[in-house]
Amino acid sequence: MTLDATLSRIDADMPAALDRLMALLRIPSISTDPAYKAECDRAADWLVADLASFGIAAEKRPTPGHPMVVGHVPGDGPHVLFYGHYDVQPVDPLTLWDRDPFDPAIEETPKGRVIRGRGASDDKGQLMTFVEACRAWKEVNGTLPCRITFFFEGEEESGSPSLIPFLKENAEELKADLALICDTGLFESRVPAIMTQLRGLLGEEITLTGPDKDLHSGMYGGAAINPIRVLAKILANLHDVAGRIQVPGFYDGVPDLPEDIAQQWQALNFDHGAFLGGVGLSQPAGETDKTPLEMIWSRPTAEVNGIIGGYTGDGFKTVLPSKASAKVSFRLVGQQDPHAIRESFRAWVQAQLPEDVTAEFHGHGASPAGQMSTEHPAFEQARAVLGAEWGHDAAFTGCGGSIPVAGYFKTILDMDTMLVGWAKDDDQIHSPNEKYDVESFQKGIRSWARVLDAIT
């Protein structure tokens, strides 16, 4: 009866839960832009107050960057830590949004009702599914089913510079039997997925300099080296015709996919045509001897995320630029060493520079891949109950994204992590018009209630 009563309370309280989420979404907590520092503080304060509204002792903890929010619930049985992040990505380009990204609204779409706004899916909506499940449970039962620590970060979208020092300084307080993270999604937008492996992430910014000033391309073109041409050639050399990355030593530590895992993934019947078709594409572009699911879950990547050089404004300017730059990210798997790859990549770039061109490098984070152990009984307990909510048996899956905190929980706190989330493939996270399905929000809350019931 306890679980049934809690699920009924969740359903009855949905209008109020949506109102609370909308209030949090209105706070423009963009962590990467110093102009929004006060808004990040305000989001942390909002979460402290919201936890306090149903009796959770929580506080805002200062860091050199944006604050952490930590709350504790005493109790018997297992101790779980729930992690989420309250910061969001920038909204540029604003002109591609159909509404103010921080004026969230519920919209009717051909696929159902959605919550539209920055952070709706990544990660405020997901974070609040756990908070709302705990609220309903406590209102029905008077107490929560186990000991819980709430841990909310404000710098996840800007590289988490304060996270590792904070975890080390507060390790005794934060260590639990199991960490829970809700920052992932459903498989093919319908099957509940428990992520068992995550790719690591390495970011590099290259700036090439040729002449000491921008030049007139008529007066100097042909005689003077153009750094854009040099940069374009280097970037084109990143992959061979079979899609393999050409940085020396890049594949050191990349494991073969175990046969049993390959069979599980094959059984998912991944429709890569629909996956790519949903974004206007048709053909997989990775390594030609790998399946599309392997490409996004278990193989490393090198992607050019941005190129800058010369004149890019309206009209035309016949300039031969002094500088050209690019941002390149690498998704890593297995035992790949991000620091070794960084050094190898920089040496590889330097080796391709002609005379009169120099390179400067700026690193943007370096985290290894993560492999989640599923030996803790909570993994099978959670998998057994999620199907009742979603109508599909839950699956252990991989994830193409990077959530470094899961690895830090293991290396710093010696704590296994269960990654489960309710986002859909078309939520447009990090893009204009981000959304989160109202159904995902409601079922996500109900799912956490089921999981808490199962593991306690």
Image: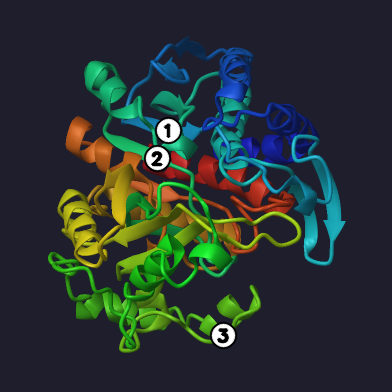
Circle 2: element type:
strand
- Camera sees residue 416: no
Could you tell me if residue 67 is visible in this image? yes
Whether tag 2 and tag 1 are in contact, CB under 8 A, the answer is yes
The reply to whether the C-beta atoms of the residues labelled 3 and 1 are less than 8 Å apart is no
Neighbor class of circle 2 (other Cα within 10 Å; few <14, some 14-19, many 20+) is some
Amino acid of disc 2: Leu
Give the residue pinned by disc 3. Answer: 273
173 on left or right of 61:
left
Which mark sits nearer the N-terminus, 3 or 2? Answer: 2
Element class at badge 3: helix
Residue 88, quarter of the rendered image: top right
Q: Which residue ends up furthest to the front in the rendered image?
A: 219
- Residue underneath mark 1: 82
Type of amino acid under label 3: Gly
Vertical side of 442 occupied by 273: above or below: below
What residue does disc 2 label?
180
Residue 5 horizontal side relative to residue 186, left or right: right
Instruction: Specify few, some or many for label 3: CA neighbours under 10 Å numbering under 14, 14-19, or 20 or more.
Output: few
Quadrant placement of the C terminus: top left
Whole-Å distance between the Cαs marked 3 and 1?
35 Å
In x, y percent, where is residue 7? 64, 41
Where residue 267 appears, x then y in whole percent?
Answer: 40, 82
Residue 424 in percent (x, y) is at 60, 60
For mark 1, give the secondary structure. strand
Taking depth in this image into account, of 346 and 157 the one nearest to the observer is: 346
